[in-house]
Image: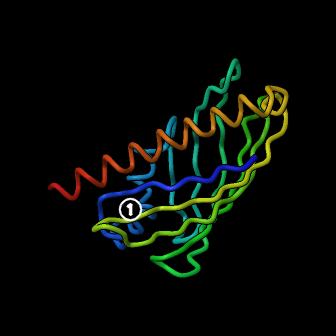
Amino acid sequence: MELKEEVFIAAPRDKVYAALNDPEILKECIPGCEELIKHSDTELEAKVVLKIGPVKAKFGGNVTLNPENPPERFSLSGQGSGGAAGFAKGGAEVTLAEKDGGTLLTYDAKAEIGGKLAQLGNRLIQSTSKKLAAKFFQSFAEKMDASAAA
């Protein structure tokens, strides 16, 4: 499965980059996130509850950040397990470009799933993934707007 998207965020690139590396902000923006622990500058651990079609599961997983060229570009990879619901693993390339007084965030993500989740069908997984990504970026953009206004 692949997801590609561009999102405009009305905040300077360095602030967007810093927020994308702030576990408190991420926890508030990630749909279903119950816990997000930063073990180091590049290692995060998360617990997320998701409902995908008829399957609701609690996923535990790890994410590794690779700051290739901060604040312009970074990548991340991760994997998580939802017990009987299955597993997911994947990664994303993220680019932050200064544009019109804000930041244009572009991401290209790829993921693999297995277990019960894989049995739900690619269309359901793809549409749910797009909705979750849209929810995350809407929350993230609102949080950035609120901090810019403060």
Q: Is residue 122 left or right of residue 23?
A: right
Q: Name the foreground residue: 55 vs 9.
A: 9
Q: Judging from the image, what secondary structure is the residue with disc 1 in?
A: helix
Q: Name the foreground residue: 112 vs 84.
A: 112
**Which residue is depicted at the point 14% across and 55% down?**
150
**Which residue is depicted at the point 45% across and 64% down?**
21
Which residue carries the number 1 mark? 19
Q: Is residue 127 above or below residue 144?
A: above
Crowding at dot 1, Cα within 10 Å, few <14 / some 14-19 / many 20+, comes out as: some
Q: Is residue 89 left or right of residue 139?
A: right
Residue 81 rendering spot, x and y as whole percentages = 74, 42
**What colour scheme has been applied to the protein in the rendered image?**
rainbow
Q: Is residue 52 above or below residue 73?
A: above
Q: Is residue 6 left or right of residue 101?
A: right
**Three-letter amino acid code at the position of disc 1:** Ala
Residue 57 rendering spot, x and y as whole percentages = 67, 29
| Residue 8, picture quadrant | bottom left
Q: Residue furthest bottom?
A: 69
